[in-house]
Amino acid sequence: MQVTYPSIDRSWPGAVADTGWNYGLELLEGRGYVTIPLGVLKVSGTDRWTWLNSVSTQDFSNWETASSREALILDPTGHIELSFFAVDDGTNVWILTEEPRGTVEFFQAMRFRSRVEIADVSADFAVIGYLKTGDKDSLAAQFWSEQARVTWTDPWPGPVGNTTTFTTPGASHPADDPAAPHRELAVVSHPDLPALEAKAATNALMKADLGAWEAVRISLWHPRLGCEGKPGTLPHELDWLRVAVSLQKGCYPGQETVAKLTNRGRPPRRLTFLDLDGSREELPAIGSPLTLESDGSEVGVLTSVAYHPTDGQIGLGLLKRQVDPAEMLLVEGTRAAQSVIVDPSGDNPRRLDDSKLSGLLGLRARKK
């Protein structure tokens, strides 16, 4: 039997507290950049769009050259296996992923007779991250986009295409704020990186630590494979459908579970934003249990944590869905207040309630 779904080691970037938080303010102000440890793949061939459309959750069928996408690969039961960013330069689809080895293994196993070629070019290219605000180019964006072979612009928070969201209806999203930072990635020549970084320094650009980049991601509520996308996690639990899952297409691994949970079910857990009280200088460890302050019962797990340059200690956690958002949580003795990301009701605009379902069933019966 062919092994289609590889065993994934989701350890990047390991203990986030060890990655440092230097120059976070410069990053926010567009005067900093970060080297992101992402693998780089190239998918070429005339079938590259239709083939990617068939193996991932994203709709690549009517893609535009130079537009940026985010996609997931699910196992047959609908749980997250891999995630990747994608942008097409007119000849190749550039894939940026935390798991290049696992992604290549999966892609090769799913080629069949499709006219595609898959190459891992991680040794040849480096990925640089920087921030923009609104439509304004930052100093870092101007510099690195000029050096890039290709750039990827984060579509978060979308929504992208025919999809749905699991946030509370009418609630604001931090990434929708006109003043919110927007992430961009530049793929540059790896051999040229030392010279490019030296040139960046002469242009008054500071190299920030990876932890600062993570802090921005957390503040925008954006899940990541190595932290939130652990084995057994459903994209609905993370509100990841909004940019990475098309509900208009089918026939990809896990599609049946995606449709059932969207139309009739509710995710068993929910992602929440955590504002830590900062009573301890040391950050709690990722993977630490989240407990209720009221009775000490364990209700979830800390998935991400960071020092934000303006917001202080923040994190993301995965909770049992029905935990009261007003409950104060504890993580390693530190108090953490919740901000709702995935609504505790588990509802989404595409969910069929009993009255809608009865109407559909009645319509089908009348057609017979």
Image (cartoon, grey):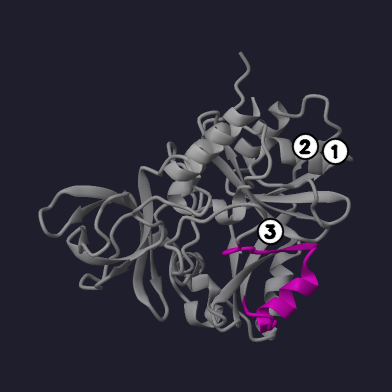
Q: Is residue 55 left or right of residue 217?
A: right
Amino acid type of disc 3? Ala
Tell me where residue 186 appears, x and y as whole percent: 71, 65
Amino acid type of disc 1? Asp
> Which label belongs to residue 47?
1
Residue 116 falls in which quadrant of the image?
Answer: top right
- Quarter of the image where the N terminus is located: top right
Q: Is residue 252 left or right of residue 312?
A: right
* Among numbered discs 3 and 1, the one appearing first in the sequence: 1
Q: Nearer the viewer, mark 3 or mark 2?
A: 2
**Mark 3, residue position:** 126
- Quarter of the image where the C terminus is located: top right
Magenta span covers which residues? 132-158
- Graded by Cα atoms within 10 Å as few (under 14), some (14 to 19) or many (20 or more), the crowding at tag 3 reads many
Question: 69 or 36, which lies in front?
Answer: 69
Residue found at x 80% / y 62%? 149
Would you say residue 160 is visible in this rendering?
A: yes
Between the residue at mark 1 and the residue at mark 2, the CA separation in whole angstroms equals: 6 Å
Tell me where residue 64 appears, x and y as whole percent: 82, 57
Q: Nearer the viewer, mark 3 or mark 1?
A: 1
* Among numbered discs 3 and 2, the one appearing first in the sequence: 2
Residues at marks 1 and 2 touching, judged by CB atoms closer than 8 Å:
yes
Amino acid type of disc 2? Trp
Residues at marks 3 and 2 touching, judged by CB atoms closer than 8 Å:
no
